[in-house]
Amino acid sequence: MAGVYIHIPFCKQACYYCDFHFSTNQKNKTQLCRAIATELELQQHYLAGEDLHTVYFGGGTPSLLNKEELSLIFDSIKNNFTTHTIKECTLEANPDDLTLLILQMLHALGINRLSIGIQSFDDTILKSLNRAHTGEQAKTCVAHARAAGFNNISCDLIYAIPGLSDAEWRKSIQEMLELDPEHISAYSLTIEEKTVFGNWLKNGKLNPMEDDLAGQQLEILVDMLSDHGYEQYEVSNFAKPKYEAIHNTNYWKQQKYLGVGPSAHSFNTVSRQFNVANNAKYLQAIESGVVPFTLEMLSKEDRINEYVLTTLRTKWGSNLKWIKEEFAYDLQEKNSQYIEQLLESKLATLQDQFLILTKKGMMLGDKIASDLFVITP
């Protein structure tokens, strides 16, 4: 179930909360797409011949690419990988980019899933986040996507925004439900150091929402989406039946993936590698026939901890039997008292040796996972 992630490091403008690698200078956009196409060729053996099941265009803002730029990348994927096994091809997009003509072009090229960064329907909130679209544009682009033939649409929301009331949050969720997307991703606003919000926090110009209030907004979200047929299959992700994101699910299940483009990460179960997060350095290296990455070999402890951290965030949970067989480590025995406490507190269940967090437990998922981590000798 291998996947390819393609990082497109360009945006129209910088959202105040975003710390992903991107540039608002689009001067070298076509040149960088050519470099990505070249990297796909250079990295064609990374997945060791495994069937390619997913392709994911992330960023940045992949919806800024034109037909020729996307075709460069698609042609390289087809030339260097087996593509008849691809089940899901996702492109992240901003509402202000998605005209009907562009959506028809994306659908014709083979994009079969859209991930639309709506974040909010309130224009005042969107402006406070420095988003480029309006709430009305968000609604229109989803209608246009349907008209263009898309039947697998994911939409993003953000909660725990400073000043966001529960009533406003409920209204935003309701407006999302009226669009009836197959998938919804909802993220708690995290204030990162090297962002505008990070600087405002440091200078006392921003007061983050308290954790208990953010948790309350997550509970509102879970309840409202559950009432409308969405399942919380990962802490931040909700889907109608059979519409879980295949690509992201493979991340959480520790499947292999190749990341191409500046700042992209790759994983082959025994190591990770991280491409340089600098467009100019990336272009220079690729033009010299070199992929500019840093390699990190993963210890047994690293691999167990990553598996526990990612799988506990999902409805499938952590396979304790697999950990024991794969790493000769009995996580259940080593943490028997703690796991018993989780069961008694109804924070988790144990089903056929899968440790699965309950709805209540998912609220504390990262803390529970860290408590189960193997300490590196």
Image (cartoon, rainbow, N blue to C red):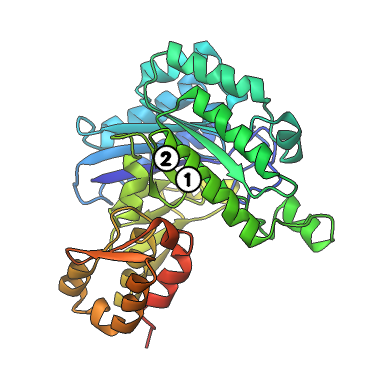
Percent x, y for residue 207?
Answer: 77, 57
Please report the residue visible at 52 percent of the width from the left and 22 percent of the height from the top. Answer: 66
Residue 102 shown left or right of residue 303 in the figure: right
Q: Which residue is mark 1?
A: 222
Establish if 20 lies above or below 116: below
Q: Which residue is mark 2?
A: 226
Question: In the rendered image, is residue 57 in sight?
Answer: no
Please report the residue visible at 67 percent of the width from the left and 27 percent of the height from the top. Answer: 133
Give the label on residue 148, or none.
Answer: none
Please report the residue visible at 62 percent of the width from the left and 51 percent of the height from the top. Answer: 189
Amino acid on which the number 2 mark rests in the picture: Ser
Q: Are marks 1 and 2 in contact (CB under 8 Å)?
A: yes
Please report the residue visible at 32 percent of the width from the left and 71 percent of the height from the top. Answer: 343
Amino acid on which the number 1 mark rests in the picture: Val
Q: Residues within 10 Å of mark 1 (few under 14, many from 20)?
A: many
Q: Residues within 10 Å of mark 2 (few under 14, many from 20)?
A: some
Establish if 140 lies above or below 127: above
